[in-house]
Image (cartoon, grey):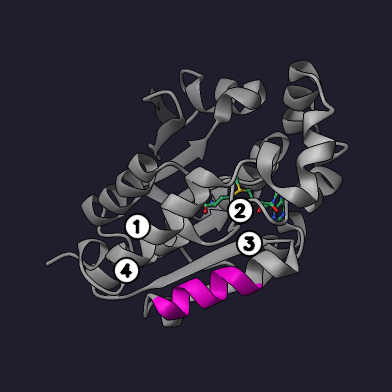
Amino acid sequence: MSTLLSAPVAPLLDRLFAHADATEPATTPSVADYWNGLSREERAQLVRSRADYAEFYGRMKDVPLAVSRETGTLLYMLARIGGATSIVEFGTSFGLSTLCLAAALSDNGGGRLITSEFEPSKVARARTHLTEGGLAHLVEFREGDALDTLASDLPEHVDLLLLDGAKALYPDILDLIEPRLRQGAVIVADNADFCPAYLERVRAVGGGYLSVPFGSEVEVSLRLG
Ligand SMILES: C[S@@+](CC[C@H](N)C(=O)[O-])C[C@H]1O[C@@H](n2cnc3c(N)ncnc32)[C@H](O)[C@@H]1O
């Protein structure tokens, strides 16, 4: 039986995904006025912004902004297919994707998941959720800006990288992790459409990756060599 599909992880994810689906910026008291005062273009610009990401995500501290349930399942599947034992995640938030990836590590026989988040209250929530799921022993939480926290002390090799933090930083985070990506490693980048430079890089012929959009949410890339 899969850890993803059995207690305590399955009912925990049911609860957390239901909460995430019901918790939009537009209806979350701490951020609703700010969010509802922005035009559609201003919102898109903020999500893309390199200058304002710290302020933007700081305001989103009460909003899970989680991957979809389908992406969570895809993450679990990709980590299982590749037999991943070493995973890096950019953007922990409340830890929903972290739970899916840690469940895969557990079913692969163990390993290490390094996850990065700069909002302290989100790190605390994610830690609670991973403890509730019985998977905290597999996860190393790195609190602070991932540009700093993922710049050193990385594992020898990385089997899977999830990019789900500030979109403008995807190329920078890839720069940090790329030397550790093993041949055959997988990168999943959520909402990568907001970072054209990232897509250009992983889709470039001869650039070292095979890359396709998968569904409407993620770009899935295979490290070739
Ligand atoms: C889309 S959410 C992540 C959702 C999470 N992967 C999940 O599925 O549950 C993005 C998170 O990345 C964090 N973040 C954004 N830029 C960051 C950075 N430079 N360093 C660390 N965390 C960052 C934000 O605070 C936010 O919580």
Circle 4 residue: 9
Q: Nearer the viewer, mark 3 or mark 4?
A: 4
Q: Secondary structure at mark 1?
A: helix
Amino acid under label 3?
Ser
Instruction: Give the mark nearest the N terminus, 1 or 3.
Output: 1
Amino acid under label 1?
Asp
Q: Nearer the viewer, mark 2 or mark 1?
A: 1
Circle 3 residue: 116
Q: CA distance from mark 3 to mark 4?
A: 21 Å
Ligand 1 under 8 Å from disc 1 Cβ: no
Foreground pick, 142 / 182: 142
Amino acid under label 4?
Val
Q: CA distance from mark 1 to mark 4?
A: 9 Å
Instruction: Give the mark nearest the N terminus, 2 or 3.
Output: 2
Q: Nearer the viewer, mark 2 or mark 4?
A: 4
Ligand 1 under 8 Å from disc 3 Cβ: yes
User: Does residue 168 lie above or below 112 as drawn?
Assistant: above
- The part of the image, by quadrant, that contains residue 53 is top right
Circle 2 residue: 91
Instruction: Give the mark nearest the N terminus, 1 or 4.
Output: 4
